[in-house]
Image (cartoon, rainbow, N blue to C red):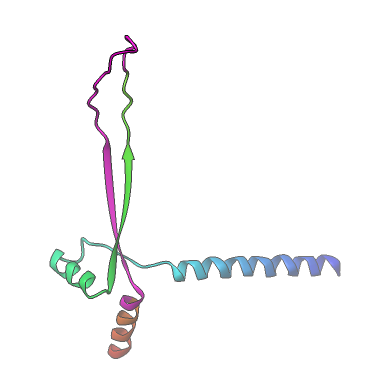
Amino acid sequence: MRSEISSANRELDSFKYRELTLKRKIAAPQSITENTIKEFEMANIIRLGLAKVIYTASAGTHSIDIPASDPETYTSVDFDIEIDTETTTILTELGELFIEACRNKNA
């Protein structure tokens, strides 16, 4: 009897975990692939507030070796900083409601 109860509890915990993961996937914003939509169409979608652009920036540094010399002198060094920016376009809540309304109208 105890093993059946513990088995049922484990199964219940498993279902709760699956429910949480599914809720997170449902709540995650839908990404829009820009290769299927022309640039001016994407600009209009963003301007209407149906989608928004998320920017992710990352920077890379380059090490610089400065030779040690007289502590009284200054050294001038030119260096490069690499900055990469990735953009992701996602649907807003308004965009999701708009798509849902269009689907309901066509159904």
Residue 22 lies, with reference to residue 62, above or below; the image says below
Count of marks, rendered view: 0
- Which of the image's four quarters has the N terminus? bottom right
Q: Position of residue 79 (x, y in %)?
A: 24, 28
Residue drawn at 26 percent across, 74 percent down: 49
The front one of 19 and 85 is 85
Residue drawn at 20 percent across, 72 percent down: 47
Give the quadrant of residue 43. Answer: bottom left
Residue drawn at 22 percent across, 26 percent down: 78
Q: Is residue 77 magenta?
A: yes
- Which of the image's four quarters has the C terminus? bottom left
- Furthest residue to the right? 1
Residue 102 lies, with reference to residue 16, above or below; the image says below
- Furthest residue to the top? 70
Q: Position of residue 88 (x, y in %)?
A: 30, 58
Give the quadrant of residue 14. Answer: bottom right
The front one of 70 and 52 is 70
Residue drawn at 34 percent across, 82 percent down: 100
Give the quadrant of residue 62. Answer: top left
Q: Position of residue 2 (x, y in %)?
A: 85, 67
Q: Is residue 47 magenta?
A: no
- Furthest residue to the front? 72
**96 relative to 11 in the view: left or right:** left
**What segment carries the magenta color?**
66-95
